[in-house]
């Protein structure tokens, strides 16, 4: 089943920024089924927001290109049309009051075709003007990985996935509720990062015994921390008693005497 990316992005942003920015998604722009991806409305002074949200306007229309999509000239035409409709809907005469964000992992050379004075304002962010609307290019491929940007980067797909997963694990306690999405959206990168970690460093992560056995050979698990320590350390609460005993027996068999 295809992943609906922009509702996921909205969910991540709402979870971590809702006390600072009102974020709405799928905003109707008329009687036809025409909707903007995202609408940002900061509820605190914009200058107090972390990078790159300090480049939001009040309000900001966001257009997001998901995994496999590339932002190009058509994206520009689309977000300009949304901005014009929103301007009429809200009766905003000054276009400088409506900021546009295009968020994507890939940008075609034609993206900037109709943007005036597009220039970098920070890592992963460029600013320009589109038909008198301030517009920002948010490039997920080069945006710094920080606690503030992680909700944006959760929907990134590409060469940086391992780096993003590594950052997530380093800040696991802060972002542990994202575990399910990390496993779902970045499964291969997660496996690769975990395989490179020392078994001892897996303490505290929500990995049950079955997950550990998928990542490491049973004999390596026993050799590293010992059978009894594995049983004490790894969460087996999700397993039935029969499943738990079966896995322990497999470990004993793989590790010889279990020492």
Image (tube, rainbow, N blue to C red):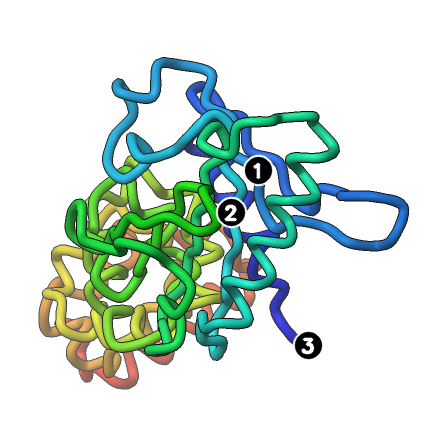
Q: Are marks 3 and 2 in contact (CB under 8 Å)?
A: no
Would you name the residue on which mark 3 appears?
1
Mark 3 element type: loop
In this view, the residue in front, 114 or 190, is 114
Would you name the residue on which mark 2 appears?
62
In this view, the residue in front, 42 or 247, is 42
Mark 2 element type: strand
Would you name the residue on which mark 1 appears?
39
Can residue 225 be seen?
Answer: yes
Determine whether 112 is above or below 108 in the image.
Answer: above
Q: Are marks 1 and 2 in contact (CB under 8 Å)?
A: yes
Kindly identify the residue that appears in the image at 47 percent across and 57 percent down: 181
Q: Residues within 10 Å of mark 2 (few under 14, many from 20)?
A: many
- In the image: residue 244, left or right of residue 136: right
Callout in the foreground (1, 3):
1
Image quadrant in which you'd find residue 78:
bottom right
Mark 1 element type: strand
Can residue 248 be seen?
Answer: no
Q: Position of residue 195 (x, y in %)?
A: 20, 75
Q: Closer to the N terminus: mark 1 or mark 3?
A: 3
Kindly identify the residue that appears in the image at 40 percent across and 47 percent down: 135
Q: Residues within 10 Å of mark 1 (few under 14, many from 20)?
A: many
Q: Are marks 1 and 3 in contact (CB under 8 Å)?
A: no
Quadrant (top left/top right/bottom left/bottom right) for the N terminus:
bottom right
In this view, the residue in front, 18 or 259, is 18
Tell me the CA gap for discs 1 and 3. Answer: 26 Å
- In the image: residue 149, left or right of residue 186: left
């Amino acid at each position: 089943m295809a992943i609906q990316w922009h509702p996921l992005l909205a969910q991540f942003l709402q979870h971590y920024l809702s006390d600072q920015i009102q974020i709405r998604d799928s905003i109707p722009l008329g009687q036809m089924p025409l909707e903007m991806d995202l609408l940002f409305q900061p509820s605190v002074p914009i200058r107090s927001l972390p990078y790159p949200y300090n480049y939001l306007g009040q309000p900001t229309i966001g257009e997001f290109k998901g995994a496999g999509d590339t932002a190009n000239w058509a994206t520009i035409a689309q977000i300009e049309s949304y901005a014009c409709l929103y301007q009429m809907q809200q009766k905003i005469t000054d276009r400088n009051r409506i900021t546009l964000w295009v968020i994507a992992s890939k940008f075609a050379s034609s993206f900037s075709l109709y943007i005036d004075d597009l220039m970098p304002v920070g890592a992963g962010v460029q600013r320009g003007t589109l038909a008198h609307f301030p517009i920002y290019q948010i490039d997920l491929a080069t945006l710094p990985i920080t606690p503030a940007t992680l909700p944006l980067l959760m929907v990134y797909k590409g060469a940086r996935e391992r780096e993003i997963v590594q950052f997530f694990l380093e800040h696991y306690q802060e972002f542990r509720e994202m575990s399910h999405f990390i496993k779902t959206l970045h499964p291969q990168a997660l496996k690769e990062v975990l395989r490179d970690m020392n078994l001892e460093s897996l303490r505290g992560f929500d990995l049950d015994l079955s997950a550990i056995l998928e990542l490491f050979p049973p004999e390596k698990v026993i050799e590293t921390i010992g059978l009894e320590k594995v049983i004490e350390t790894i969460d087996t609460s999700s397993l039935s008693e029969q499943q738990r005993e079966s896995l322990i027996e497999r470990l004993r068999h793989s590790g010889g005497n279990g020492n």
